[in-house]
Amino acid sequence: MTRLETRAVSRAFAGGVGVKNVSIVVEQGEVHALVGLNGAGKTTLMRLMLGMLRPDSGSVTIDGVGVGAVVSSAWASVGHLVETPFAYAELDTTSNLKMAAQLRLTAPSAVGNMVGAAVEEFGLASFANVRAGRLSLGNKQRLGVAAALQHNPGLVVLDEPTNALDPAGVILVREAIRRRRNDGAAVLVSSHHLDEVTRVADRISVMNRGSIIGTLEPSTPDIERAFFAAVLADDETRA
Ligand SMILES: Nc1ncnc2c1ncn2[C@@H]1O[C@H](COP(=O)(O)OP(=O)(O)OP(=O)(O)O)[C@@H](O)[C@H]1O
C-alpha cells in the first residue's frame, strides 16, 4: 500500500466546517504535510482517508482501490495515529507494542525483534515495563508513534505526531518518519509546527476552513509569514 488519493472528497457536519471538495495525493517515497489552523479540517480529512469516516461525496482510494473495499490483510501495511494514541492502559509499553505488531499480522517469530527495535528507536527503554496508563503524555505519544511505525508500513498517516513531545522526542519522530520515507513509504502528516514541517516534508498543502487552499514549498523562507498570508487571503475571498 503506497499511494493514497482523494478526489473531490467532502464531509459536512452540522455546525462545523468539515471537509469540502478536497483532492490530494500521497505518493510513494514522499512526506506530504497538511498544515492549517485549529479546526481547518486536517483530522477529518485523515479520518476520511483511512475509512474511519464516510464522505458525503467524492472518493478515497488506496493503491487505486476504494477505501471501503481494501481487504483487511492489506491494512497490515498501513500505519496510522489519528487523534489520541491508542494504548491499553493496563498493559505495559512492551505488551502494547506486541499487541500492535500482532494486529498488523506480524509473524510471531518476528514480534520480539520488532518490538525491541521500536523500544530502541523511540527511546522507550526506561519505560518498557511501565503500564501505559502511567506514562506521561509525551511518552504515551512516543508509544503511539512507535506502534504506528514499528512494522515499517508502506503507507503512514500521522495526525500531529509531535504533539506533547519534548525536543528529543521531536527529533526521534522526525528521523523515524524520514527513514520510512527513504525506504519508500508514502507518508501523510499533519502539524501546526511549520518549522518542524519544513524539516520533514517534501510537499506541504495548506488547509483552511475545510479546503486545500494552496501549497507551500518546504524551502520557503519565513514560511510562517507565507502560511498566514495564504490563510488571510482565503479568509478575505470568503468574507
Ligand atoms: N464529529 C464531528 N461533529 C461535528 N463537527 C465536527 C466533527 N468532527 C469535526 N468537526 C468539525 O469539523 C471541523 C474540522 O475539524 P478537524 O478536527 O478536522 O480540524 P483540525 O484541522 O484537525 O483541527 P486541530 O488542528 O484543532 O486538530 C471543525 O469545525 C470541527 O468542529
Image: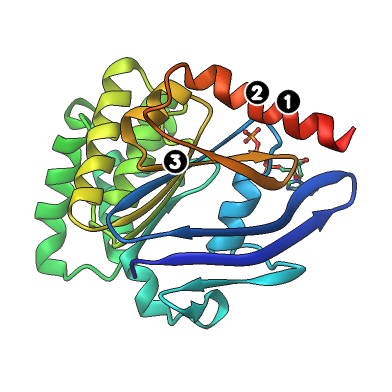
Q: How far, Cα to Cα, is label 1 from label 3?
A: 42 Å
Residue at x 67% of width, y 44% of height? 41
Q: Earlier in the sequence, mark 1 or mark 3?
A: 3
* Percent position of residue 121, x then y: 17, 37
Indicate which disc residue 229 carries: 2
Image label count:
3
Contact between marks 1 and 2 (CB within 8 A): the answer is yes
Residue at coordinates 31% horizontally, 67% vertically from top-left?
A: 77
- Identify which amino acid the numbered label 3 is placed on: Ala
Of badges 1 and 3, the one in the foreground is 1
Secondary structure beneath label 1: helix
The residue at which mark 3 appears reads as 89
Q: Amino acid at mark 2?
A: Ala
Figure quadrant of the C terminus: top right
Q: Where on the image, by quarter, is ligand 1?
A: top right
Label 2's element? helix
Q: Which residue is mark 1?
A: 232
Q: What percent of the width, then of the height, locates residue 76?
A: 33, 69
Per the image, label 3 sits on a secondary structure element best described as loop
* Type of the residue with mark 1: Leu
Check the image and report above or below for 193 versus 91.
above
How far apart in space, not on screen, are marks 1 and 2 (Cα)? Answer: 5 Å
Query: In which quarter of the view is residue 94 placed?
Result: top left
Tell me whether the residue at label 2 lies in contact with that at label 3, contact meaning CB atoms closer than 8 angstroms. Answer: no
In this view, the residue in front, 111 or 8, is 8
Seen in the picture, residue 58 relative to 22 is either above or below; the reply is: below
